[in-house]
Image: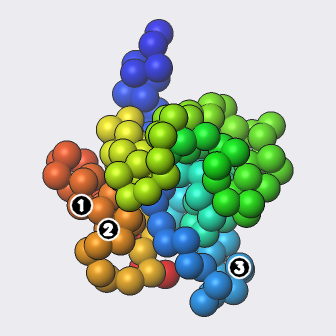
């Protein structure tokens, strides 16, 4: 059985969200993840390996589910912010795969490529946007999901 076959059997979810999470207590995020990620805990999650929602969701999933977890970095994990590297290190035993896309430069094009990669490998996307501005990476990812005809769940934070 190939990875693609496995993804067809188990639900694969891309997670996208704001990097700015200091405006809410951590318990709020845990409650949101319990409500909106737990129903998919028997599946496979793709996370962007960034700070903010990516790191918070990674730690929550690792502690509270048996889900398959894949972290996707636009370049390498070593290029990620300290908060993200720490979350990956703390949960390494629960991470199934780390995908390093090897971008030469970490900028908007590299992050958008990472987001598209996750959506292309997932059957749906759950997004945790902080703002309604369509120019954010979270909204770019959610819009790309819609363009692909895949379901998206939007949970404003």
Distance between the Cα atoms at labels 3 and 2? 22 Å
Q: Which mark is residue 139?
A: 2
- Colour scheme employed for the rendering of this structure: rainbow
In this orientation, does residue 73 appear?
A: yes
Label 2, label 1: how many angstroms apart (C-alpha)? 6 Å
The residue identified by callout 1 is 143
Q: Position of residue 99 (x, y in %)?
A: 56, 34
Q: Dots 2 and 1: beta carbons under 8 Å?
A: yes
Q: Position of residue 20 (x, y in %)?
A: 56, 78
Q: Residue at x 36, y 45 (%)?
A: 113
Q: Residue at x 61, y 40 (%)?
A: 76
The span from disc 1 to disc 3 (Cα, nearest Å) is 27 Å
Element type at mark 1: helix
Q: Residue at x 66, y 43 (%)?
A: 77
Q: Is residue 64 visible?
A: no
Looking at this view, name the residue that lies furthest to the front.
105
- The correct choice, above or below, for 83 with respect to 70 in the image is below
Q: Residue furthest top?
A: 1
Q: Residues within 10 Å of mark 2 (few under 14, many from 20)?
A: many
Q: Residue at x 33, y 58 (%)?
A: 141
Examine the image and state in which quarter residue 60 appears. Answer: bottom right
The image's mark for residue 98 is none
Label 3 packing within 10 angstroms: few (<14), some (14-19), many (20+): few
Q: Are marks 3 and 2 in contact (CB under 8 Å)?
A: no
Circle 1 or circle 3, nearest the eye? 1
Q: Secondary structure at mark 3?
A: helix
Q: Is residue 105 left or right of residue 57?
A: left
Numbered-mark total: 3
Vertical placement of residue 26 versus 7, above or below: below
Q: Residue 26 shows which numbered tag?
A: 3
């Amino acid at each position: 059985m190939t990875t693609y076959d496995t993804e067809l059997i188990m639900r694969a979810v891309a997670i996208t969200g704001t990097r700015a999470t200091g405006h809410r207590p951590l318990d709020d995020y845990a409650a949101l993840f319990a409500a909106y990620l737990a129903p998919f805990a028997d599946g496979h999650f793709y996370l962007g390996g960034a700070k903010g929602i990516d790191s918070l969701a990674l730690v929550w999933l690792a502690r509270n589910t048996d889900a398959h977890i894949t972290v996707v970095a636009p370049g390498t994990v070593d290029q990620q912010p300290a908060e993200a590297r720490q979350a990956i290190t703390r949960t390494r035993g629960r991470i199934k795969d780390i995908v390093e896309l090897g971008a030469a430069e970490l900028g908007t094009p590299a992050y958008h490529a990472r987001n598209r990669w996750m959506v292309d490998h997932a059957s749906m996307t759950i997004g945790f946007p902080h703002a309604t501005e369509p120019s954010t990476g979270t909204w770019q990812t959610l819009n790309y999901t819609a363009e692909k005809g895949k379901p998206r769940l939007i949970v404003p934070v």
